Amino acid sequence: MSDRKATHIPGFDELVGGGFADGTINLITGPPGSAKSLFGIHYLVNGAHMDDEVGIYLTLEESRESILRAAKGFSIDLESLEKDGKLFIVDLGKMRMECTSSEELEWGLASFDTLNDFLKNHLSFSSATRLVLDSVTAVGLYYKSTELLRRELFKFARLLKTSGLTSLMISELTSDGETRYGIEEFVADSMIKLDYESSSGEYRRTLTVKKMRFTKHDPLKHPFLVMDTGIEVSPDEVIG
């Protein structure tokens, strides 16, 4: 049995030894519009179709309807996977919208404690092995200090590592190229940076594996495309 969770994203897995090591936490980061959520969707959908694994997409920002619509744009049918019990889309953002700001703070809807409780209950019946958290940026807004966020994020990471999940956490980059809170990369076992840049008047998307524990990986910057069926990485082409 493999000790990897393959993404089956064309061109990506060969950069990282066949996929993410089992039980690891993997940070997918980049500016808005860099295909971070699409990467997460691929990870879960391909795991369900090709490895018969159950996944959870935990969203705090985009609505469930928005995620379904985005996936359909790439001919990905998430609802059929939901019906088969291979995918669970959990929209905590909807719960947040249906309460006041004071109620959200009182109930801790966006806190790591809430996520901990949810996962402990959910894993008891779903047998999920893959998780996408979209996004850790949204959870961080709940905490009043970076110190408190750091402590709670590390506690949450320990739960993920002992839960049998191989997780992707999505986080946005700031305009100066840093993660939103400056601590996410220290919790994660790997950091994948998605970006887009201008070259000769044209924009192109890039992917760089910034770090990856337990795995020999390609650290170079590679172009990727968002095709009709989703993400395709060019592992043999390097951007200097």
Image (cartoon, helix red, strand yellow):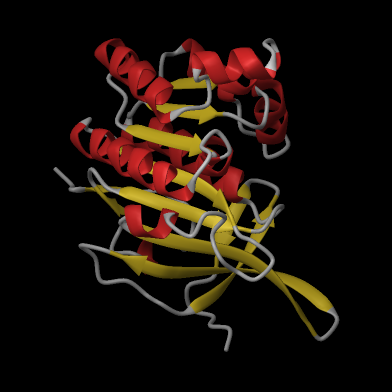
Residue drawn at x 46%, y 61% is: 192
Q: Is residue 236 above or below residue 44?
A: below
Image quadrant for the C terminus? Answer: bottom right
Is 100 positioned to the left or the right of 194 in the image? right
Percent across and percent down for residue 105 are 56, 20
Residue drawn at x 66%, y 58% is: 31
Of residue 29 and residue 1, the one placed in the foreground of this image is 29
Q: Is residue 27 above or below residue 38?
A: below
Percent across and percent down for residue 104 are 59, 17
Residue drawn at x 72%, y 71% is: 204
Is 16 positioned to the left or the right of 58 in the image? left
Residue extending farthest right: 201
Q: Is residue 133 visible?
A: yes
Percent across and percent down for residue 177 are 60, 69
Of residue 174 and residue 131, the one placed in the foreground of this image is 174
Percent across and percent down for residue 129 are 29, 31
